[in-house]
Amino acid sequence: MVHEQTCRSSLIIRASSSCAATSQKLYCSSHFQASEEYNRTFRDYDANVAPDHQDVRTPLGRLTETSLASRRAIELARRRFQAAAWMQNMVGPLDLSLEPTEEEFRMCLMNGVVLCNLINKVHPGAVPQIVQHIPNSPDGAAFQCSENIKNFLLVVEEMKLPAFEVSDLEKGGLHIGWTAKLVDCILSIKAYYEWQQSGRQELWKLGSYKSSTSPHQPVPRPVVSCSWFGSGRSEVSISKSECRNFNDWSLDNVGSVSDEYCSFTEKSGMIWKGHSAHVMDSTLAWVQHVCRKYVDTFMARKRNSRHASVLGIPDTSMPCEALLKLVMAVLDDKSPEEVATLVEFMLKKVIEEYRQQSLCQERESGQLYLKSQTFNQEVNFSKNTNQDYAARLESQSNEIKDLKSALETTRLQFQKFQFGWEKEMEALQGKLQGLGQAAAQYHKVAAENRELYNLVQDLKGNIRVYCRVRPFLPGQRNVQSTVDYIGDRGTIAIQNPTKQGKDQRKSFTFNKVFGPSASQEEVFLDTQPLIRSVLDGYNVCIFAYGQTGSGKTHTMMGPNNPCPDDWGVNFRALNDLFYISHERQDVVRYEVAVQMMEIYNEQVRDLLCSDGTNKKLEIRNNSQQNGLNVPDASLHPVNSTEAVLDLMALGHKNRAVGSTALNERSSRSHSVLTVHVKGTDLTSGDALRGCLHLVDLAGSERVDKSEAIGERLKEAQHINRSLSALGDVIAALAQKSSHVPYRNSKLTQLLQDALGGQAKTLMFVHVSPDQDSYGETISTLKFAERVAKVELGAAQSNKESGEIRELRDQVAYLRDALARKEAELELCQREHRVKGNDKFHEKAVNDMLAVSSTFSYGLDDDSIRWQSHHITSPDSRSSSTTTSEVSFPINSAVGNSGPRNSKARQGSFDYDDFDQLIPHPSLERTRSISAQNNGSESDRKRQMKGR
Ligand SMILES: Nc1ncnc2c1ncn2[C@@H]1O[C@H](COP(=O)(O)OP(=O)(O)OP(=O)(O)O)[C@@H](O)[C@H]1O
């Protein structure tokens, strides 16, 4: 079914009858359903879209020619604007507004330069030479115009694009739309250009193109399938650009397809050709009215979105308006029968299309909805996150505030404490000063206390005698004891079972008597104060006396491998010594050293000699420099009881031990452990010396009873002799004899400084309860009683002031010098005797002897004496000597500074040698004193020098 119109291109639509029938039904249904809504929305349309043309619209919606012309004018204007915009874009900038009038549009194109540039842009080189403006030439503009436009139109013609007349540019028009051809031409170039840009994948259907014989390149015509009307059954061939967007399908498109470039597709069976607009008859007007109503429905829906859900059509008016125009153009030349079918078909297509689009949009909106949901969730999440962050931030800022306030509080508290501490420090400083004063006072009081303490000890007696009765040994049970009674006040009664009457019982009194059951600790208790005296600078001697097997070693050492309870006096004394020295370490610094010797057969042996040679030692009581009586014995510094015990173990190993008939362990030597203590007062710097002799004497048994013979007899005799000498010394001390026989035995010689008046002595007298030992017991107790009655007078501490030390040094120095000179003199005398008649040597010796002097000193009367012996004859055997003596006092006693034997205190020296060898400042002082006291001596010395 084809219908053609002559004045304009016509659209030929082929549709199947079945489609038409279906469309008819749809149309009727939608018509009656929408009639009410149409009447309402039509009025809205008149008010919004065409308010100036309400007078030409009948209640049934008839359209007049005026309204169509008006719409056409609008459409033409839109196409013009579109063309102008595209030209600006392609070859701009142009002297052309966005919405140019038709005259402006013509003026812009009139010289043809824009057109040539445009065609060259689309088809480069299409117009090889563009005539530019020729100034100062009256015909230049006309020439330019004709040449450029002619060339442009040639190219357009070759490209089979819609052209225009040159006259269309040369003069303006009086009717609306006189630039329509110009606009059509531009837009067709635009369409071609866009097809070109798309890659030419579709056919260009706007017309045949010239072959390669054309001076320009062939331009293929694009064929664009528009899916606007359905899926293959019906298609409308139209410019691709005009189908790109549904909104673009406006009156411009209608105008475009109204030209003859709309074509025909065999597939769809529909042909659309351009045709001229005619006045429609009443049927057509009715159809148009229906379309109009349809359009107006969308308009109303645009304003009221709830209608969109009813019809499922996109909420836009422009496509509907374009559709209306299209329908009007299509139905323009149709018969009423054809119109009905065609319209129904078209409406059906429209509805389907819109439904599909609606579905797409729903899908899109669904996706959009999902996206928006996701987005909303993300927004909510981020909002929540932000809220969390904000909450955290707030809590952190609150914490910071709390911390700041806590810091401030702490700072204030610290300041408060600091202030308090400063106050306390001041108070403490005051207290410290007070304590310092108290400490000084304490030292003073402590010193006084020490003096008082030792005074009390002195009052108790410097020789104390304690008696200890040994218990019966295992196996001696049921044996009657000789000890009859032991009283509280140091009384012991010994009974003789073999005698009767007053001779049967003898009593003795000592400082204390310990019975057989007395423990080691009890025995030591009264010894303890003496240990303190050692540290105060006193000499202390503790010795155990008694017959063999009476328990001396047990008291002093304890049994073999003793437990602490069985420790003897030695262990306990040393323990106390170190304990007290440690207690006083802040006041006095003590140095402790140990010697251990034995006296065996009147020979002194070193028990701590590391090489085990047990060499014999000399006792030198005048060795005052270091306070050692036996300076050659090894001296071991110690700082603990354990160290002393180790040394004692070594000493006992070296001690000579033999067995006798009385006691297997009986030792036949006196053991002497001497602990030397040297203290330095940390405050005053005063030095003190003390020593503690711990003596385990050999057994005092009678020789006949011990049944010893040979070597043992000799040992026993030595032991008895030394014990007898000890008794003699004690007796001499008791009688205050001027001579005390210390040198009668090595034992008394060794213990001389501990037995004299300046020492404290404690003797443990041991008694065996055996009846067999009665005689020994009585003699032992008698000896002990004699000792107990000795009054030594006040003990003296070995403290040295600076002056005493100086004098002591001086004396020692002089003694050394004397010893040297004596050795020299003896050597000379020996030589003289050898050479006999050698006059020369004789004279020399005589000279020397003539000036020799003997220096003697003594401290007994707190003075130093100086005696000079002048030899007047060279023959020593017949020489006569004159003696002069000088003595001068010293401020304080030096102590036991030398032997009382006058021989030991004398030496000879030469005055001249004395001057040369002894440049001692103290001697100068001595000599000056000597000179003052004995002028004749110095005179004589000068005479000797002169000679
Ligand atoms: N008080 C005591 N308690 C218990 N046992 C003791 C006591 N005194 C001594 N003995 C014991 O008596 C024995 C002889 O003692 P000890 O060896 O001490 O005598 P001694 O006088 O030292 O003899 P010696 O002169 O031969 O050295 C030892 O077995 C000892 O254990």
Image: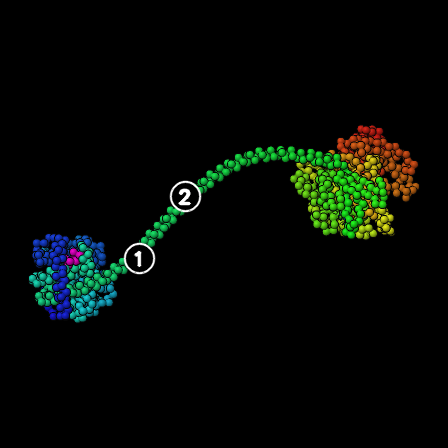
* Camera-nearest residue between 266 and 866: 866
* Camera-nearest residue between 630 and 529: 529
Residue at the image point whose x is 24% and y is 67% from the top: 201
User: Dot 1 lies on which element?
Assistant: helix
Residue 113 appears in the figure: no
Q: Amino acid at mark 1?
A: Thr
Q: Is residue 266 left or right of residue 710?
A: left
Please provide percent x and percent y for residue 411: 47, 40
Residue linked to disc 1: 374
Q: Which contiguous range is marked in magenta?
A: 295-302
Q: Main secondary structure of the magenta part?
A: helix
User: Dot 2 lies on which element?
Assistant: helix
Residue 689 versus residue 373 in the image, above or below: above
- Was residue 297 drawn as part of the magenta stretch in this picture? yes
Residue 735 versus residue 389 in the image, above or below: above
* Camera-nearest residue between 598 and 532: 532
Residue at the image point whose x is 24% and y is 63% from the top: 197
Q: Amino acid at mark 2?
A: Lys
Among all residues in the image, which is located at the extreme front? 501
First in sequence, mark 1 or 2: give its number.
Answer: 1
Please provide percent x and percent y for residue 840: 89, 40
Please provide percent x and percent y for residue 574: 71, 44
* Camera-nearest residue between 578 and 875: 578
Mark pair 1, 2: CA separation: 39 Å
Residue at the image point whose x is 72% and y is 43% from the top: 522
Crowdedness of circle 2 by 10 Å Cα count: few (<14), some, many (20+)?
A: few
Classify the position of the N terminus by image quarter.
Answer: bottom left
Q: Is residue 52 left or right of residue 500?
A: left
Question: What's the mark number on residue 401?
Answer: 2
